[in-house]
Image (cartoon, grey):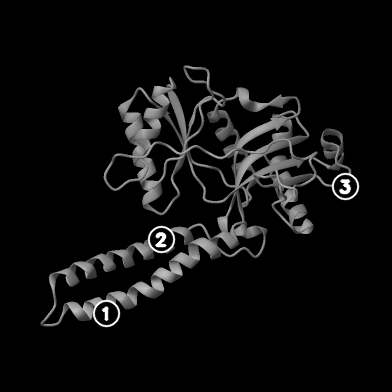
Amino acid sequence: MARFAADPRWLVYLPPTMSPSEPSQREGYLEFPAEAFAHYRAAGVSRVVCEEKHMGSRAVVIACRDADAARERFGVTTGETGICYTRPGRRFFSDATLEAAFQDRVRAGLTAAGSWEQLNTNWVVLDCELMPWSAKAQELLRGQYAAVGAAARGALPEATAALRRASGGASARPEVAALLERFEQRGALAGEFVAAYRHYCWPVQSLDDLRLAPFHILATEGAVHTDKDHTWHMETLAGLCAAAGDPLLHATPYRVVDLASEASEAGATEWWEQLTGRGGEGMVVKPLDFITRGGKGRLVQPVDPRL
């Protein structure tokens, strides 16, 4: 929690990060679903849920039915009806007008879906991913990802061209041809690197350019929903997104996997390969139950296998 954090009365939950899976022994892969599934089997978990991983920024959204509900439940007297904040507790939006408009649309979606009545509440806390990643991580993109991509794509073509000229002469040596092949491969990889991070970046001029993907209903009046399994969370939120009819609210695709079934695992692995094959980030794998303890009583964490 940073010293620039939002009003602490809003900060009812600060989300953790995810645990990586074991490195894959499979040729050409850093991570693979098989290791994540094996991890959970060893912990005594029988079923897991695989959720598409969105390359955005983690966001906690608190939405209240009105300012009275915000005051009564959270003690906030500024007239706000909610907040969207980041993992360390900072406001996601620096523009109060933009945040108010964001809250209006989330609240309208909850109203259209009948969520206030369904959940018997005047407020809700959602665990979400807010996309695109570039909306919050612009400096990270410029300083670490784009800089590397620009340097590689600026230098490698010239080096490759020089090697190509050298390899075609009468005095060309075999090691020059081998070096040329290596640099051509590096050039192709640099292009794939740039394409990969650009998949998660697009211009944001207004709220219409954002996508909010909720994946947990953390709490409502009188209830902390850790007693529900992840299927309940995903289905309830998918219904919310569909009923809202607002492109801002984005349902997260998922699959339930039976770890005693090779066919079930194979289907999830194929789905993961399709996700990553079209440039997706991959998937998050969690025990089906919201809170799960392993054989030694330790909490079993979600893992994040991806290419």
Q: Is residue 31 left or right of residue 111?
A: left
Residue extending farthest right: 77
Circle 3 sits on which residue?
A: 78
Residue shown at 64%/59% (left/top)? 208
Disc 2, SS: helix
Query: Percent from the top left, x then y, of residue 252?
Result: 53, 42
Amino acid at the residue labelled 3 = Thr
Q: Against 244, is 188 above or below?
A: below
Image quadrant occupied by the N terminus: top right
Circle 2 sits on which residue?
A: 193
**Along the viewing direction, whichever of 185 and 159 lies nearer the viewer:** 159
Residue shown at 70%/47% (left/top)? 85
For marks 1 and 3 on the same chain, the one whose residue lies earlier in the sequence = 3
Distance of label 1 from label 3 (alpha carbons): 65 Å
For marks 2 and 3 on the same chain, the one whose residue lies earlier in the sequence = 3
Circle 1 sits on which residue?
A: 162
Crowd rating for badge 1 (residues with CA inside 10 Å; few <14, some 14–19, many 20+): few
**Along the viewing direction, whichever of 236 and 204 lies nearer the viewer:** 204
Amino acid at the residue labelled 2 = Phe
Query: Percent from the top left, x then y, of residue 108?
Result: 72, 46
Query: Percent from the top left, x then y, of residue 62?
Result: 73, 41
Disc 3, SS: loop
